[in-house]
Image (tube, rainbow, N blue to C red):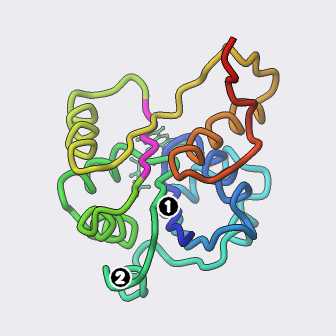
Amino acid sequence: MKIIVAITGASGVVLGKGFLDAVKGKHETHLIISEAAKKVMKYELEKADEIGKLADYRYKEDDLEARIASSSCRIDAMVIIPCSMKTLSAIANGFSDNLITRSAENILKLGKKIVVVPRDTPLTLAAIENMKKLKLAGAVIMPPNMAYYYKPETVDDVTNFFVGKVLDVLEIEHNMYKKWKGK
Ligand SMILES: Cc1cc2nc3c(=O)[nH]c(=O)nc-3n(C[C@H](O)[C@H](O)[C@H](O)COP(=O)(O)O)c2cc1C
């Protein structure tokens, strides 16, 4: 599978890293990190500079001449993890002024799979409306919500569970968390 992975400037950049880790060597990844995300990474990641090594291809946020800026580029899915309220708004309202929002526009135009992981709390009405718009446009909206029933003990447990949920949406097999087998 060819997947565009965008990491934007919301808290939870570790989820983007976790996703890249999970698909490394198994799926082709095209990574875009926003300038704001680079700032957040300084607070949230140990080796922020090394995240790029997890992807097959890397692009600058402002590189609107990149091949993935065109809908003619064959891409199967896009994951925006985490997604800031700014990027959420831009995509929901068709404001495609960078490679992240332009790529998302292409994915939506073509009706391909797009997973958006919007992170903020509490949410403004604008954010809720933007999520609704994207849902109606065909995106899968996955706020990085926790679950407790599997008894997470570490931050990694929480990250892996959520990344596993994203992989489920993309129909990618994984062992990130123990699937519920029924009673
Ligand atoms: C440490 C830090 C944490 C942030 N966390 C969030 C967040 O969780 N959600 C959000 O929407 N914005 C958050 N922001 C603000 C965004 O980074 C800001 O709105 C930025 O313009 C987003 O740009 P981007 O969408 O191009 O990445 C945070 C900023 C900083 C510095």
**Residue placed under numbered mark 2 in the picture:** 64
In percent of width and height, residue 75 lies at 45, 74
Viewport quadrant of the C terminus: top right
The residue drawn where x is 49% and y is 51% is 9
* Residue 15 spot, x, y in % from top left: 63, 45
Name the image quarter holding the N terminus: bottom right
The magenta stretch spans which residues? 115-120
Q: Secondary structure at mark 1?
A: strand
- As for residue 93 lying within the magenta part, the answer is no
Q: Is residue 79 left or right of residue 42?
A: left
Q: Earlier in the sequence, mark 2 or mark 1?
A: 1
Eyeballing the image, is 57 above or below 131? below
Q: Position of residue 142 (x, y in %)?
A: 45, 37
The 10 Å Cα crowd at callout 1, few under 14, some 14 to 19, many 20 or more, is many
Query: Callout 2: few (<14), some (14-19), or many (20+) C-alpha neighbours within 10 Å?
Result: some
Q: What residue is at 23 percent from the left and 41 percent from the top?
A: 130
Residue drawn at point x = 26 percent, y = 48 percent: 89
User: Residue at 80% of width from left, 27% of height from top?
Assistant: 154
Q: Where on the image, by quarter, is ligand 1?
A: top left
In space, the residues marked 2 and 1 are separated at their CA atoms by 14 Å
Magenta span: predominant SS is strand
Look at label 1 and name its amino acid: Ala
Q: Amino acid at mark 2?
A: Leu
Q: Which residue is identified by label 1? A: 6
Q: Where residue 94 appears, x then y in whole percent?
A: 19, 60
Say left or right for 20 vs 63: right
Q: Quadrant of residue 97?
A: bottom left
